[in-house]
Image: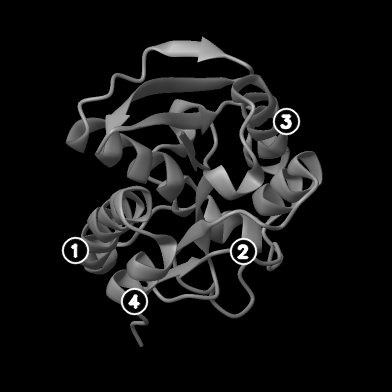
Amino acid sequence: MKIIVGLGNPGIEYVNTRHNVGFEVIDRLSEKLSISMNQEKLKGVYGSGMLDGEKVVLVKPMTYMNNSGECVGDIARFYKVQPVDVIVISDDINLSVGSLRIREKGSAGGHNGLKSIIFHLRSEDFPRVRVGVGMKRQGQNLASHVLGRISKNEEEAMAEVLDDAANAVICMVTDSTQTAMNKYNKKVQ
């Protein structure tokens, strides 16, 4: 069993913001895998289905980004899975738009949602898919950057990387994280 978590913020005002790319990847996975996101409990919205003979649970925490670990920890304990079976999809300001970085484990890298998950899982040993959303402009407030929308000239690259992220997650479940890293990790300048 795999728990696949996309990070974001609940609420209409956060739709299509840089911080919500995790939610957008979950939406793509929901569509590709025909999994309805129609259940709500444990501080999240989720749906479950099968992928290549393995049960998968798609999750969108409804706790706001900085408290994502509350939902993730509760769901991991509810389904009795280890951190290695939790795949987390998040934004990454240190990667340019169109870049994708998949890792088997690691630190939060300054991302508050990942910090919360590490705290609640009591482990850094969970795979993650980090979607590049670009660095903030000099003098720009970080919050206004990550809560801002993708610009028109970035939309095509973002749509492509969101599809790649969904396909990478599928590869992680059906093959391995290492295979997904080899196939989908990409850095755009």
Q: Specify the quadrant of the image occupied by residue 139.
A: bottom right
Q: Nearer the viewer, mark 4 or mark 1?
A: 4
Q: CA distance from mark 1 to mark 3?
A: 33 Å
Up-down relation of residue 93 to residue 31 (above or below): below
Residue at mark 4 to residue at mark 1: CA–CA distance: 23 Å
Question: Which element carries disc 4, helix, strand or loop?
Answer: helix
- Residue located beneath label 3 in the image: 70
Q: 26 above or below 87? A: above
Q: Is residue 163 left or right of residue 185?
A: left
List the residue tagged with mark 1. 156
Task: Tell me the amino acid under the disc marked 2.
Answer: Lys
Which mark identifies residue 182? 4
Residue 67 position within the rendered picture, expressed as x and y whole percent measured from the top left: 72, 37
Marked residue nearer the N-terminal end (3 or 4): 3
- The vertical placement of 6 against 140, above or below, is above
The one nearer the camera, 10 or 121, is: 121
Q: Tell me the kind of residue under disc 1.
A: Glu
Marked residue nearer the N-terminal end (1 or 3): 3
Mark 3 Cα shell of 10 Å, populated few (<14), some (14-19), many (≥20): many
Q: Residues within 10 Å of mark 4 (few under 14, many from 20)?
A: few
Query: Mark 2 — residue?
Result: 105
The label on residue 101 is: none
Q: Nearer the viewer, residue 61 or 55?
A: 55
Q: Are marks 3 and 4 in contact (CB under 8 Å)?
A: no
Q: Earlier in the sequence, mark 4 or mark 1?
A: 1
Q: At x 32% / y 62%, what residue is drawn?
A: 151
* Amino acid marked by disc 4: Asn
Contact (Cβ within 8 Å) of mark 1 with mark 3:
no
Residue at horizontal 34%, vertical 45%?
A: 25
Viewer can see residue 18: yes
